[in-house]
Amino acid sequence: MNRKNSRLIKKTLLQRILRKTITTSTILMLVIMMIQACSAERRLANKIVKVGDSISVCIIDPWILYKYNMKTWEIPKYDSLPENTRDSLVYFNSKYLQFVKDSLFLGLYLGNLKETLKTYGIRVYSQDSINAFLASGGKAYLFNLGQITLEEYLDPVKKTFALDTTSSWEIWCNAVGVNVWYEASVLNVNDTARKVLFANMYVRDKITGHFEGDFFNGGVINYVYQKDTISLKSVYNLATRSSKDHAAYIFDYILNDLIARKAISGSPPAEYLHYDPLKKKLVKAGNNRFSIIK
């Protein structure tokens, strides 16, 4: 190998090493920046949590509880019926919705929502005390529960035999879901845009069972099960359970909104945070949060 080729090979190797070093350094720098950004956001989040009493929240109650029975196929010639007739028949053919008292369900939801919000140390107002809310000062957030709906439907639960994935059973279960849409707005800021927030939760029949049959000799396999059907009490419990989760979502929305507003860049947090008031701990929210529609 002559000297010219040797120098060329060394130069090429050095260039590769240099490029690799620069790439590694760049990645390392980005990782450090991300860690520092997350750490800064968490420090900021801790400060916000500690001064929770300077945050005011007003909840505007909904006018009505909408109820929809999705099991339209149970009504003969449903598509050919007049709309008013269809709505009436579907409603009175429901297994649960027709027996749900609107005032009781809404009372459980709104009462638990507001009481849970208070556990975060923030000031909570109702629409009846809107003047006090407007005069409260500090960071003021208005959450208008624009719509809340109950839906009754059938939900398939699939059970598959682990040793033979071609053997599966689909069990149709009763289910009732609650859906909420909030309009969130912030007072005393230049940004007056409203955000539409969505969340849902459901309850359905519980299935307990086991597989029976000749597992190892190609015999017939069956899934033997029992169904624990939901009751009207289950639907009312759904109001309580969902309200407590949604109260957490409201506080987390405020927390992440304040982080974004206080951040130098003004951009949303790198990770959407959830605050656990019992453990006094910040964690990633994951999917346990409002979906921001717009």
Image (tube, rainbow, N blue to C red):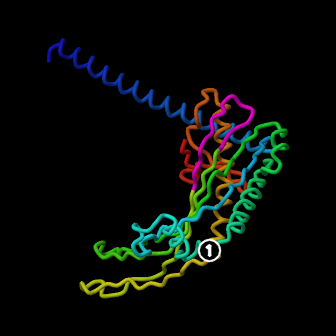
Nearer the observer, 6 or 135: 135
Tally of numbered tags: 1
Reply above or below: 18 against 186: above
Q: Quadrant of the N terminus?
A: top left
* Secondary structure type for disc 1: helix
Q: Which residue is mark 1?
A: 234
Residue at the front extreme?
A: 82
Residue drawn at (59%, 51%) of the image: 289
Nearer the observer, 262 or 195: 195
Would residue 196 be counted in the magenta stretch? yes
Reply above or below: 217 against 253: below
Q: Callout 1: few (<14), some (14-19), or many (20+) C-alpha neighbours within 10 Å?
A: some
Q: Quadrant of the C terminus?
A: top right
Q: Which percent across, then down, holds residue 116?
A: 74, 57
Residue drawn at (44%, 84%) of the image: 225
Q: Which percent across, then down, holds residue 89?
A: 51, 73
In the visual, does 274 lie left or right of 171? right
In the visual, does 11 lie left or right of 28? left
Say which amino acid is labelled 1. Ser
Would residue 283 be counted in the magenta stretch? no
Q: Which percent across, then down, holds residue 95?
A: 55, 77
Q: Hey, which quadrant is residue 150 in on the image?
A: bottom right
Residue at the left extreme?
A: 1
The residue segment tinted magenta is 184-199
Nearer the observer, 286 or 54: 54
Q: Which percent across, then down, holds residue 13?
A: 28, 22
In the visual, does 278 lie left or right of 179? right
Q: Hey, which quadrant is residue 7 in on the image?
A: top left
